[in-house]
Amino acid sequence: MTTTLPPIPSGDTSDDAANAANASGPISANDGGAGDPTESHLHIEDESRIDVAALTRVLDGRWGEMREWGREIAGDPTFARPVDMTMDDHRELTLKRLKELAKRNWSAQMLPEHLGGSNNPGANLAAFEELVAGDPSLQIKAGVQFGLFASAILHLGTEEHHKKWMDDTMSVKLPGVYAMTEIGHGSDVSAVGTTATYDEGTQEFVIHTPFRAATKEFLGNAALHGHAAVVFAQLITKGVNHGVHCFFVPIREDGELLPGVSSEDDGEKGGLNGIDNGRLAFNHVRIPRTNLLNRYGDVAPDGTYSSDIASPGRRFFTMLTTLVQGRVSLSGAATNAAKLALGIAITYGSQRRQFADFTGINEVVLLDYQLHQKRLFPLLARTYASAFAQEDLLTAFDEVFSGEGDTEENRIDLETMAAAIKPSSTWLALETIQACREACGGAGYMAENRLVGLHQDLDIYATFEGDNHVLLQLVSKRLLGEYANSLKGMDAGDVTKFVASRAETISTRHTPWRRLLQSASDLGSVRRTAASLRDPDLQLELISSRAQSLVEELSLSLRQASSMSKEDAAALVNSHQAELIDAAKAHVDVILLTAFNNGLKKIEDDETRAVLVRLRDLFALTTIQKQLAWYLMHGHLSLGRARTLDDYIARLLTKIRPHALDLVAAFGYTRDHWRAPISSGLERTRQNEAADYYRRLRASNDGPIDEKVLHRRQEEQRKAEERRREKSAG
Amino acid sequence: MTTTLPPIPSGDTSDDAANAANASGPISANDGGAGDPTESHLHIEDESRIDVAALTRVLDGRWGEMREWGREIAGDPTFARPVDMTMDDHRELTLKRLKELAKRNWSAQMLPEHLGGSNNPGANLAAFEELVAGDPSLQIKAGVQFGLFASAILHLGTEEHHKKWMDDTMSVKLPGVYAMTEIGHGSDVSAVGTTATYDEGTQEFVIHTPFRAATKEFLGNAALHGHAAVVFAQLITKGVNHGVHCFFVPIREDGELLPGVSSEDDGEKGGLNGIDNGRLAFNHVRIPRTNLLNRYGDVAPDGTYSSDIASPGRRFFTMLTTLVQGRVSLSGAATNAAKLALGIAITYGSQRRQFADFTGINEVVLLDYQLHQKRLFPLLARTYASAFAQEDLLTAFDEVFSGEGDTEENRIDLETMAAAIKPSSTWLALETIQACREACGGAGYMAENRLVGLHQDLDIYATFEGDNHVLLQLVSKRLLGEYANSLKGMDAGDVTKFVASRAETISTRHTPWRRLLQSASDLGSVRRTAASLRDPDLQLELISSRAQSLVEELSLSLRQASSMSKEDAAALVNSHQAELIDAAKAHVDVILLTAFNNGLKKIEDDETRAVLVRLRDLFALTTIQKQLAWYLMHGHLSLGRARTLDDYIARLLTKIRPHALDLVAAFGYTRDHWRAPISSGLERTRQNEAADYYRRLRASNDGPIDEKVLHRRQEEQRKAEERRREKSAG
């Protein structure tokens, strides 16, 4: 395997790929002495052992080779996130690195065969997702260039455009800007103010920023490096506004802005400072008519507008479909960031000792503290769930974007899945990184230990490529629509069954485990008969039934909106906005649990699966625990059963403890990716050195004696003296 | 009022102080057009108006003048956090600023009269807490110099030490290091490895780092600026280790490290990069005997050790008391950081428009969305609670440190209060800043808008000066101890009463509202008879009873530990560690609610109080909501009442909405402190400009017509044509 050419994915996980994965070195629990769980003070009840390499193969999934390739590049110090570098230097470095990636044919898989690619969009994103372990700035810079700029030309343009610009775009000879967002409109793209007015006289479009809020904002490559921009603007011809279209607009030549184009630098950001984000405004900038990326709508030389898609709304939606690529890939990158953080914190936690144990001599390893386990393991469990769900999402993406299954229904489903999973994984990443940073104490705050930098870079993932809250509302609206449709022309019994299977249907459309849940009545019986909260059917039933109920309740609450004035209807919907979010989040939990259950089936090794089942239980039970009040109020759990939940979870923590290092090793990241001194083994060496020092001191006779011990001895001597005196007196 | 000399606090909130506070300019809701709530689309049910200046006076409390002075300095651009500055430059700037602060007599209040101060430790911290609004790096650098280094000399040293070093320390001619933490021991100070061995021959102490893990770590001023360090080391003389003591050790002369001293630079951190944190190690460094800070323990020239405190444990505890100052002041600073973030996000949310409203023309202000309110207002409510609690904590601190009430009992109570409140306020700050950053979308990620920088700097507050989780365990242990003591020699009825009042007693020891709760039976009747969840007695009863129950349950669970082997006892305690944290957090909630209720009594204006009562309700009800499952499982709330909670909270959000800008204005911060373009009014100007553009477009006849509208018109024309034809045919 070379780092220069990406492997052509074979579409399966052959043994060769697996061996390669194994050889390139995810450390096992016993490597480097980091993970000998026998050092733990806790009694280890569980003798199962994880087959780390096999588990990595399962996690890596269909595009395992590409993930390996991505991790190889990300683990190369050449691509590591710099520490204490000025913004200016970091930006130049990132551009240089992007060009280096291009030399290695980065993102070639996204292209169709006739443009020199392999038409493997899923493979392309799989590698992209791993790049976060190098420098997230490089990842996002690559995302801007290939995922947004090149993708817009590819998907919204036609053959002439591809010929003219794709080669230079893929080689980064032509760094580009994706100019969609405006200052005044972050998430509401249909309302952008920029205009592209057709001038029949010159056969040109005039690109214009009519007011300051219409300035394009937060654009990567805008401040410095971009030579051209794909600009989203209202297409106006013959006095009619045909809605938002995309235009190729040159912005710089020889490093100078072209006439009419102005740019402002966004300057320092919370993170991702290797990217030159900035603003672009246009003052009547003229471009040739043929610079309209005209796949979905075109203007003839005489100004006549035409489109294959009659409805302006559907046309707009179709053009925005490229955005889903960003959501899918950020979701995967975020999950990987959580994996990295957990790798660092769990490794450190298994070496770092703090406070004396019951012997008063040895100190306890952090990870043996229940609290430490409780802070990290539920996040580890959700990260596994998220990783399994990501594979399903990527599969759905590949189906649509490769053209294999590019139907409107699949596109809508893909949009919904991405809108559901991206918020979950990006928030999971932030929560996990922060928990890991705090779990590493002051050491976690040192930039060299990576966690603070990861948080800084990943922070924006929660609000870009679709603000998480906005995306979740889209999901809920989809669920409500599905629910309303499902009720039409059904009798009551049908309705019940249908409702029960909705969440699952959407989440599993692209998977073989479709319709795992059979009907509402089956579910009810599961609830009644399940012996234990660790019964996977009961877990799924509880989590699904909540998701379903929330949609039903919302539907009921909003029922009257259609018969109200617009104002009253808006107020009604607004008063249930928080519930819309709850319903969507509940739906995500169903997707994640279903994906986890499905992932378990792919694990062949019994011992490995046994450990993963516990992790799944931990995920399901902590998810239920967070909503325990809801389950009690709605009678889905009895008080008695609810009271057992804490104990169940506490026991799971101790059972997962011996496998924690294997579980993070299976993510496929090594010390080359963590690049954190605290998880390098240094901490263990220092702790051993200290322990040796004290051992020698205790063994020698000339070490100082503790004042407390002296007091005790003096007291004993005094008493002995007293007794002697009493004896001799008596 | 001048910025050069700190005002001598009058100890009350006189009208003059209040007027001064008002004059220096907290903006009111109607200033600058930022806050006209009539622009909201929501119907405003509530006509109460907040007296902003009066509310600021109440919040500022006893040391209002000092807070004003601190805010004046923090709002001065000279002290603003720099954006995109290299670490090296930021460090030099911060040292320069620290010297400038010293010129203005910063921290003079901490000194007793004979050293040129006013012995007003509370006043000193009040100003310190406000400095976070300038640059947190400067605040913490000042904290290292005055709060740690100078305080150690002051409180652990004696007259000779004061004479020799205090002047140069206070003027920053002698920048110092507080060398307590070691790599191997973050929170477990008693276990530090550094030794200070007395050599009778030369009458010197030999300071030594016996192994790498004993290297002093994370020390401000250690990498570059420190001339001397106060070093915590095991004092060994005549073969006896008398435990940790503090030594004054010169480390640099003319910028060069002294022989035997080595230093490493911690480099870039997650934030606070204006401070030169680093490591210090000592290789048999000799210092004069008299450099032992000998207030609590001394060594005679012949090596004989003496101390007024016989017990080594108590002696150690006494020496550590200075640490509480850091916890108290960081807690206040964190609460202020939350205030700043809320000021920025709520102002922006009241100006920023996104997505069209029901008219399809205007866009809705973010803060009118229920979701936006739900994301921010509960945090606003808790920030108020935290601010009120901080005033009580500071009062308790002042009592002990001014010497007015320096009893052992008060010291222990102060330690417990600080250990309880500091975790709450530092986590609140991080949660609030992150919520505000996300609520501001991409704009929130721009460094110029402050929120990301605040998060970066405040992040470490959660784990330094006592890791939050470690502190909470101390609180629980104290509560368990109190509980056990309370049961000795009581009959069953007494026990019940006592238990019921414990949490309150500790939280209110220093306040006039002691023993608000009378007895368990009273509480029970409140629960039965309260008509509404907005009944403040019921709220307090619910939150207190949970805190009490958790301690009782823990006590029961751990009862057998004393009769177990050490190993089994350690395992038992470990298996309840998460519950220890829960119990401590529940206790904090009682403290905060009690402080909020007490704060309400200080508000004289009825309308202001009416609004604050709603905010208190929001705090109490969202606090109860977070633990709703517990209340249901323990029968403290009926299912019926629990189901009303969401509605109560939703209604409170809309009632607080019209006052949101006043509520953040009352914090006393202005645009000078926020320094965020998004909350400067710029956003509103841009939005108005855009609205004007569209208004002109609609008014003019030559603006482009929307394709959708065109389709509709064409359809109408077609139908009209059809009707005409039908008519003429008919």
Image: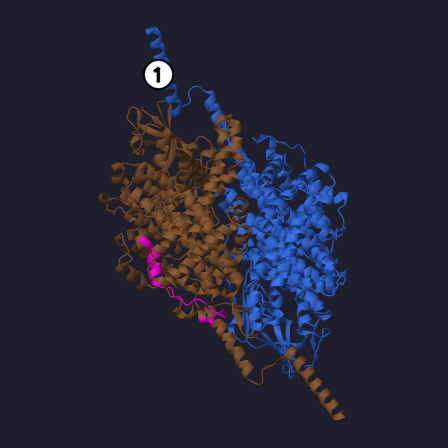
Chain colours: A blue, B brown
Q: Is residue B43 magenta?
A: yes
Mark 1 chain: A
Would you place residue B416 above or below residue B592 in this image?
above
**Residue at the extreme bottom:** B728
For the residue pair B47 and A127, the one nearer the viewer reads as: B47
On whether residue B210 falls in the magenta region, the answer is: no
Residue drawn at the location 56% of the way across and 36% of the way down: A350
B188 and A720: which one is in front? A720
Residue B25 in percent (x, y) is at: 34, 64
Instruction: Using a 10 Å C-alpha cutoff, classify the residue at mark 1 as few (fewer than 14 neighbours), some (14 to 19) or many (20 or more).
Output: few
Can residue B461 be seen?
no
Q: Position of residue A414 (x, y in %)?
A: 69, 60
Is residue A21 shown left or right of residue A450? right
A130 up-or-down from A28: above or below: below
Residue B516 drawn at (x, y percent): 37, 47
**The C terminus of chain A lies in which quarter of the figure?**
top left
- The image quadrant of residue B502 is top left
From the image, tell me which residue sits under label 1.
A718
Q: Which residues are magenta?
A: B38-61
Tag 1: amino acid = Arg
